[in-house]
């Protein structure tokens, strides 16, 4: 394999890895957003029950 061909293969592989990493990053962000929504809902539920107990 010539040096120029090897260089092109390296560039293409780096681009593939960056795209894959971006996909993983989006998946982690989506999971984090889902968890934060679930947690905020639980907090509201706890707050509502707390208000009922003291009333």
Image (spheres, grey):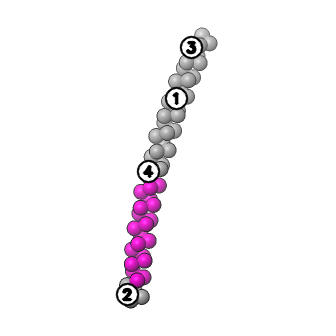
Q: Give yes or no for contact between labels 4 and 3 (Cβ–Cβ under 8 Å).
A: no
**Which quadrant of the view contains residue 5?**
bottom left
Viewer-side label of 3, 2: 2
Which image quadrant for residue 17? bottom left
> Which of marks 2 and 4 precedes in the sequence?
2
Q: Secondary structure beneath disc 2?
A: loop
Q: Check disc 3 and report its element: helix, strand or loop.
A: helix
Q: Earlier in the sequence, mark 1 or mark 3?
A: 1
Asked if the residues shown at circle 4 and circle 2 are in contact, with their CB atoms under 8 angstroms apart, the answer is: no
| C-alpha separation, residue under disc 1 versus residue under disc 3 | 15 Å
Q: Answer with mark 2 or mark 1, whichever residue precedes in sequence.
A: 2
Alpha carbon distance from label 4 to label 3:
38 Å
Q: Nearer the viewer, mark 2 or mark 1?
A: 2
For residue 1, the mark is 2
Please state the extent of the stretch shown in magenta in the rendering: 6-26
Q: Residue at x 53, y 26 (%)?
A: 44
- In the picture, measured across the screen, residue 55 lies left or right of residue 32, that is right
**Mark 2: few/some/many CA within 10 Å (<14, 14-19, 20+):** few
Label 3 to label 2, Cα distance in Å? Answer: 74 Å
x, y (%) of residue 36? 51, 38
Labelled disc at residue 42:
1
Quarter of the image with the N terminus in it: bottom left
Quickly name the residue at label 4. 27
Q: Nearer the viewer, mark 4 or mark 3?
A: 4
């Amino acid at each position: 394999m010539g040096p120029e061909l090897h260089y092109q293969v390296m560039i293409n592989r780096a681009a593939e890895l960056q795209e894959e990493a971006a996909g993983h990053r989006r998946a982690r962000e989506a999971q984090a957003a889902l968890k934060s929504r679930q947690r905020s809902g639980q907090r509201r539920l706890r707050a509502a029950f707390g208000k009922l107990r003291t009333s």
